[in-house]
Image (tube, rainbow, N blue to C red):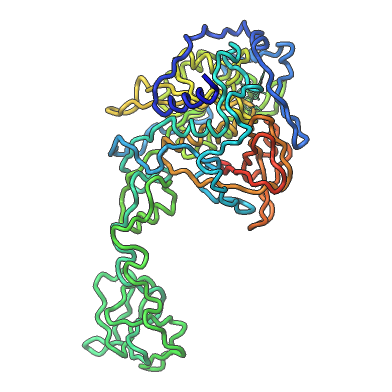
Amino acid sequence: MSGADELDEAIALANSGRTRPEPPPAPRLKRIRRIEWGENAESAGSAMDPMGEPQDHGRPDEATGRGGRDAGGERGRHGEYGRHGDKRDGAERTSGGRGGAGGTGPVPPGHPGERPGRHRNGPPQHAPDALRGGVHHPAEGPGNTEGSRNAEGTGNSARKPPPSWCEAVALAASAATVLPAETVPLAHALGRTLATPLRALTDLPSFDTSAMDGWAVSGPGPWEPARAADGTERPGVLAGDRSEPPQLADGEAVRIATGARIPPGTSAVLRSEAAQRTGARLRTATPPQPGTDIRPRGQECRKGDELLPAGLTVTPAVLGLAAAAGYDELSAVPRPRAEVLVLGDELLHRGLPRDGRIRDALGPMVEPWLTALGAEVTVTRLLGDDAEALHEAVATTTADVVVTTGGTASGPVDHLQPTLRRLEAQLLVHGVRVRPGHPMLLAALGPATAPRGAGKQPRDRYLVGLPGNPLAALSGLVTLAAPLLRALAGRTEPEARAATLGAEVSGHPRDTRLVPVRYEGSGIRARIRPLRYSGPAMLRGVASCDALAVVPPGGGAPGTDVPVLEVPW
Ligand SMILES: Nc1nc2c(c(=O)[nH]1)N[C@H]1C(S)=C(S)[C@@H](COP(=O)(O)OP(=O)(O)OC[C@H]3O[C@@H](n4cnc5c(N)ncnc54)[C@H](O)[C@@H]3O)O[C@H]1N2
Ligand code: MOO
């Protein structure tokens, strides 16, 4: 079978949900065999340094096999960063079907983020049509495995070629179906996805309304204040007055407040600052045109109009619009639940890095990243490099998505792949032709044995394995976690965006690169500048970036348009 056929088959399998035949479960990786990984590891591919920065593709101790993470490491250092409520708003489930119009089809390159068009320094342009619906860079031919590791340690012949970056995004987007929609009070709908189009339940405004404080006047003027039957001046009309204001006759005026109902017979509203009152006479220098400062009923929408399509994230503004249009509750797809498992005995969770150990940089980042991508993170667990703890955590999770950090590779204490084999998980994406982050993976775990909540249908759970290097983890997040979460939430894909390279960015010979960039200039002259200190193990560059540029194999010359990904924060 050709590489292209294999990729087609992988995509078809992921779409159909059938189980890919997996090799028989491998024997558990024992700590004592940590020297093994040096035997199996392949080349990390060409290390590039386009910004003059180290790329950290290797491990200093890999030649010797020394420095295994349990050497001198403390055991039993499991912990949690925080545990959150395990309930979904007491929502009423209304359907078991697809909630949003967003669907889960292939995802274009500029996909992540819920706020398309958001930017700090300059607006990205819309991507050229050719970039939509999945970029295929010519240099990204399938079957190209050089530079990617065989994580099974069984040689390349036993492993399918990793997908290109675009193929991986599309695989993640089509891996899951949308969670069942629920009807929830408006107060609980924030961050969920509209399951059905938002239709106006009323005209908006629902009555003719004054847009200004002043006088409702009838006719061209001058006017006299309208009077009641007893001859006294009629009280002004206030917003919220229950009774309909009485008719105005030609030449009459009555005080009116912004938002108040317009009395029948009114031709315009005269702003208070434009009105001159002399005794019983009301004049103005320039009489208002008929209709001035009156918001007519139905100006914004008519009852039944579609205000918003399904698949949109419920933002504060969506909540406000829904309330204005008469809604008390919404049919919405819940945020997918995510659980974060931080792996690595070398990690310290406070204080200065010391004694060969480093601070955990991913624990503090992954939870807010996932939240920004629309997930509800229930807990971040610190598991160290404990194969049993990892197995138990993954086997018993009730989250829709488990996100692990580190341990994706085939090092001596990289327990993720053996754990997935032990659980007979289905590997949907196993390595991606992208730098950094090529060891990332996506697996379907099958339904939970004990689904949450009485009567709830068990649903498939997924695991996204983020590589341990921090920038590689972000790469895994935008490549696999973002489209998967969007599919589960039924969220519409944001439009693909592109921006122009302001400087040459060297490329990997065969893999896509994701490069932290900043916008420079504005409008049509906006350019993106790659940032220094953007090696896979570095955070200095990405901490000040506006977006990630998707640089095709071979790189990009100044003036080239490349897709850009919004960063999830
Ligand atoms: N022989 C090969 N070795 C490696 C290759 C390769 O192709 N051949 N690829 C390298 C790349 S690229 C990456 S990325 C890593 C991925 O490995 P893992 O996902 O198993 O990650 P770890 O080994 O656990 O950690 C890698 C690196 O990241 C540091 N790390 C881990 N967790 C955190 C955290 N929470 N905060 C900060 N830093 C973290 C860890 O200490 C390591 O330095 O594999 C390479 N090796
Ligand atoms: O560079 Mo690794 O590519 O840190 O995933």
Residue 110's spot in the image, x, y percent? 55, 43
Residue 294's spot in the image, x, y percent? 37, 75
Identify which residue is drawn at 42% across, 47% down. 312
Position of 265 compared to 386: left or right? left
Q: Considering only vertical position in the picture, is 269 above or below 432?
A: below
Identify which residue is drawn at 67% across, 35% down. 539
Position of 418 compared to 316: left or right? right
State which quadrant residue 150 falls in: top right
Of 495 and 278, nearer the camera is 495
The image quadrant where one finds the C terminus is top right
Q: Considering only vertical position in the picture, is 247 above or below 243?
A: below
Of 176 and 5, nearer the camera is 5
- Report the residue that reaches farthest toward the right: 52
Q: How many marks?
A: 0
Position of 246 compared to 464: left or right? left
Identify which residue is drawn at 67% across, 46% down. 560
- Report the residue that reaches farthest toward the front: 2
Residue 21's spot in the image, x, y percent? 44, 15
Q: Quadrant of ligand 2?
A: top right
Q: Let me know if residue 13 appears in the view.
A: yes
State which quadrant residue 210 falls in: bottom left
Of 18 and 236, nearer the camera is 18
Q: Let me know if residue 112 appears in the view.
A: no
Residue 43's spot in the image, x, y percent? 69, 19
